[in-house]
Amino acid sequence: MKTTLMVLAVIATPAVAEAASSTPQAFDWTGFYAGVHAGALNQAGSLALAPSGDTPPDAALNPKLGGASFNGGLLVGYNRQIASNLVAGVEGDVGFADAKSTVVNAKADVPMSVWYADNNLSEKINGHVRGRLGWASGPLLVYGAAGVAMSDSKINVVGYCPPDIYTTSGAHTLVGYSLGAGAEYALSKNVILRSEYIYDNYGHLAMDVGSGPPNYWQDRELKLETHTFRAAVSYKF
């Protein structure tokens, strides 16, 4: 009997060791962290012209936005492991991009050889303040996030009325809401990798692009959304 028990123990030892090695190692997600992020920012939405002003007014020929750009920057945050698997936190980030979309407008029944304008929408700086809530399994954290999104926006308008060219512009700081989801993996007690998706919606905005030649510029009606896919690496203190 003793010999049998010894044989069973010898056989069971590798299986127990394998099961222990396959169990996720404990990781404490509580603490401050800072890091860098990089990815792609894609514009969506539309740019139309307010139906007032010139007679006849201009209308956008291709109102959909579709600019894309590299987006990279910095992030800082704090996590609190409030239960064995539940992690809550808050995070802020800033990103730098060069996303551009161009919309052409013209007048009905007026040939484009007589008049048309290019509307160049650009975003260069964006940021978020978000709350995060996630489920941790050892060094792996899967989370959702929601909060406030901010972005600069500028429209440069170039009007062509051969042989004359007219220019004007308008700039606004946009504020909207942000939703996202992602996953993080702790390579060590300090180094954490991340992959995530962020959706930002800035709603509708009437953008004043100024007055002056050719007598009056219609307001631009901006509806802007952005989709960001990015990776990040952070250091947990």
Image (tube, rainbow, N blue to C red):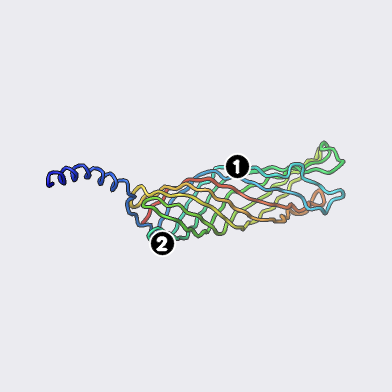
* Viewer-closest of 189 and 25: 25
Disc 1 target residue: 68
Measured as percent of width and height from the top left, residue 225 is found at: 63, 50
Q: What residue is rendered at 45% in x and 60% in y? A: 89
Q: Secondary structure at mark 2?
A: strand
Q: Secondary structure at mark 1?
A: strand
Q: What residue is rendered at 75% in x and 49% in y? A: 48
Residue type indicated by callout 1: Ala
In this view, the residue farthest toward the front is 1
Residue type indicated by callout 2: Arg
Disc 2 target residue: 80
Measured as percent of width and height from the top left, residue 85 is found at: 40, 58
Q: Is residue 40 shown left or right of residue 222?
A: left
Q: Is residue 161 shown left or right of residue 12?
A: right
Closer to the observer: label 2 or label 1?
Answer: 2
Is residue 215 among the parts visible in the rendering? yes
Q: Are marks 2 and 1 in contact (CB under 8 Å)?
A: no
Query: On screen, 6 above or below 203?
Result: above
Measured as percent of width and height from the top left, residue 41 is found at: 57, 45
In this view, the residue farthest toward the bottom is 82
Q: What residue is rendered at 42% in x and 54% in y? A: 34
* Viewer-closest of 164 and 223: 223
Binning the other alpha carbons within 10 Å of mark 2 as few (below 14), some (14 to 19) or many (20 upward) gives some
